[in-house]
Image (cartoon, rainbow, N blue to C red):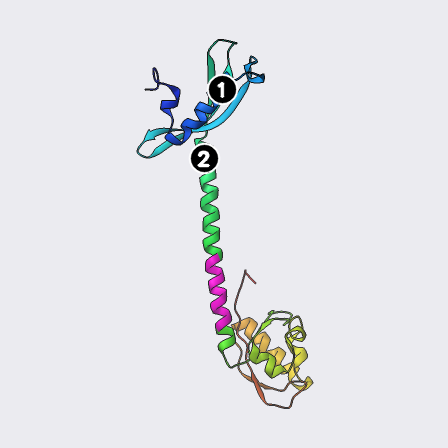
Amino acid sequence: EWVGRRWVDTVSVDSRSKVNAMLAAMQQDGETEVLGARIERQVNHPLGGGLELPVTYSLVKMGEQGPMLALGRDLRAVAAVQQRLVDAQQSMERDYLRLRHTEARYRLLFEAVDEAVLVVDALSLTVFEHNSAAARVLGESSKRIVGRSLVDFLAVGSQVAAQARFAQARSSGRSEELAVHLNNSEADLKLSASLFKQDSA
């Protein structure tokens, strides 16, 4: 269908300026007049149904006054990979936004409860996170809570029984409540632990 038509009429409207620019550049004086000079541009050919054929053309002069050869490379495979990359990036951005919203809701819930809540490593009992209520109960700043073992905050007389409750939570998923004392307070507290998995840990 292209035979007998002007090359510029076989491409999409937004690609016509590129074709004209290539042809004009090959007609200019200077280095582009040298035999074998090459100019390369990507253009699109309409295929109907809203589809387009992306092609990168190299335009080569066959002689001083002779014809020009347009060598085209089909870019549909490259375009498909590019589209998959765009789709993957957009999907990642959507997932990241959902994650941010989920984290924001988690933070609001975490701080809204009156009970002291700590997130600790199941084996080392190292504190990862805590809410404001936990900081008030422990009487410590956040910097002095995160990274320490939860057992360090308990009075010596409560540590062995607490370790047993944590072992119970590791094996059954939840522990029974235990009355404990902190090492800096005589207040009666109830300690319970629940196991949850994150990232297979």
Whichever of labels 2 and 1 marks the residue nearer the N terminus, that label is: 1
Give the residue drawn at x 30%, y 33%.
49
Give the residue drawn at x 49%, y 56%.
96
Label 2 crowding class (10 Å Cα cut-off): few <14, some 14-19, many 20+?
A: some
Helix, strand or loop at label 2? It is helix
Q: CA distance from mark 2 to mark 1?
A: 21 Å
Left or right relative to 61: residue 3: left
Left or right relative to 12: residue 168: right
Left or right relative to 123: residue 77: left
Q: Main secondary structure of the magenta part?
A: helix
Label 1 crowding class (10 Å Cα cut-off): few <14, some 14-19, many 20+?
A: many
In the displayed structure, 68 sits above or below 158; it is above
Along the line of sight, which residue is nearer the eye, 101 or 24? 24
Q: Which residue is mark 1?
A: 59
Number of labelled discs? Answer: 2
- What amino acid type is highlighted by mark number 1? Leu
Q: Is residue 116 magenta?
A: no
Instruction: Give the quarter of the image for residue 153.
Output: bottom right
Query: Label 1 near label 2: C-beta < 8 Å?
Result: no
Helix, strand or loop at label 1? It is strand
- Hey, which residue is sitting farthest left in the picture? 49
Where residue 12 sits in the image (x, y, percent)?
37, 29
Where residue 135 sits in the image (x, y, percent)?
60, 79
Give the residue drawn at x 37%, y 30%.
13
User: Magenta span covers which residues?
Assistant: 97-108
Where residue 27 sits in the image (x, y, percent)?
50, 16
Residue 79: image tag: 2
Instruction: Give the quarter of the image for residue 154.
Output: bottom right
In the displayed structure, 92 sits above or below 124; it is above
- What amino acid type is highlighted by mark number 2? Ala
